[in-house]
Amino acid sequence: MSDNPSFVLKAIEEVSYEERPIPDISETEVLVAVKKTGICGSDVHYLAHGRIGDFVVKKPMVLGHESAGVIVKGSLSNVRKVTGANIPISVGSKVKHVNVNDRVAIEPGSTCRLCDACKSGRYNLCPDIVFAATPPYDGTLGRYYRVLGDLTYPLPDNMSLEDGAMMEPLSVGVHSVVNLGKFRFGQTIVVFGCGPVGLLCMAVARAVGAKRIIAADVVPSRLEFAQKYVGAIPYRPLSPNKDESKLDYSKRNAENLKKTLGVGDRENAIDLVVDASGAEVSIQTSFYVVGTGGTIVQVGMGNPHIQIDLTPLMTKEAVFKGSFRYTQGDYPLALSMVAQGQIDLKPLVTHRYKFDDAIAAFKATRAGKSDDGKAVIKAIISGPDVDPEDK
């Protein structure tokens, strides 16, 4: 069966709309009619460069992985193979917590469930993960998407489908701040980079009960938004001096941040630093500003080959962790924070597009602003035949 229009990346800077088969589902799966999909920086990066690190686009791939939708009737593939019949069902027979017409957020990565990483609850590290819109696997920017039943999360009545699509990047924030950063009530956090993930990390920190949230970015408008959105204390990094090395600049910048904002290594210390920028100087600065015994979580992806000063990491006995997607408990906590009113995602959705206008959505996200000059924080693409204003 077809009637599954999809937005496909064919090569660098080349996309098209194509009909894809409507997938059959197994007894553990559901078929979701995708209604809302957010554009992630990784989607843009694949479009512009055809790769992220070792993940290389080698064949046409449907883009998108930040999605929510409605469960629809599908056909049970094993029954179809045995009987030759296309038998409509609501959900796979082993899926018990959702049913047809349920609105759900989609967690877009299925794993083997057998390896040590999966069994230990760190399934994001599964070597056999099948993640939407990560080569060679298709993403969610189509009419339908097949997903394991337990990777769908019913949306409470007070949450919109747009909120559901935002569960994916919010779970990245939950994973970085709560799961890895062990952030607690009354602590102080610095976030480098006020893009969507950085803002969501700040929102999670506020929901937990942060004493201080410091937002660092080189773009004044982003700092203003962070200040308004979560009450963050804005810090705009210094400009580098001529012929100054990156390490020397980062150390000077860190000292300026600490002096300007009254931050010490022990008193009024920074408990958690999250780098959501991937910029080398931001990562370097993190080592100098983190408090004694504090934690640095690296969630932004940039140049993998950078120079760092290990001395502060060692003398402060700080902890440096990499963050990769999300894992056990992150999606449920993200849903709970929004459902209980601790995080408001609506201000982050600045642009909405029809499915047929996906190219314009990617163009605006890539440029950081739409044709009318409005800055983009998060652009949402509606599914085929879905009104962008129907949230």
Image (cartoon, rainbow, N blue to C red):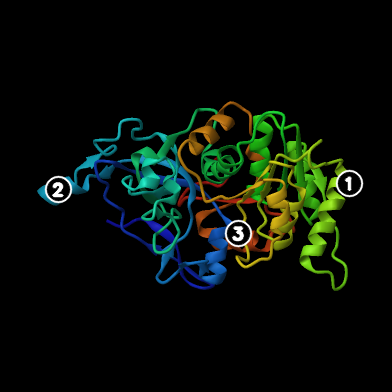
Q: Which residue lies furthest to the left in this view?
A: 83
Residues under labels 1 and 2: Cα distance?
72 Å
Q: Mark 1 points at which residue?
A: 259
Q: Name the residue under label 3.
A: 301
Question: Which residue is painted at 14% across and 48% down in the image?
Answer: 85
Question: Which residue is painted at 34% across and 33% down in the image?
Answer: 99
Asked whether 14 or 243 is in front, the reply is 243
Whether residue 351 is visible, yes or no, is: no
Q: Give the quadrant of residue 374.
A: bottom right
Q: What residue type is labelled 1?
A: Lys
Q: Nearer the viewer, mark 2 or mark 3?
A: 3
Asked whether 131 or 317 is in front, the reply is 317
Whole-percent x and y of residue 279? 69, 61
Q: What residue type is labelled 3?
A: Met
Question: Which residue is painted at 58% across and 32% down in the image?
Answer: 338
Q: Earlier in the sequence, mark 2 or mark 3?
A: 2
Q: Which of marks 1 and 2 is nearer the N terminus?
A: 2
Q: Name the residue under label 2.
A: 85
Q: Give the quadrant of residue 230.
A: top right
Q: Which of marks 3 and 1 is nearer the N terminus?
A: 1
For the N terminus, which image quadrant? bottom left
Answer above or below: position of 358 versus 147. below
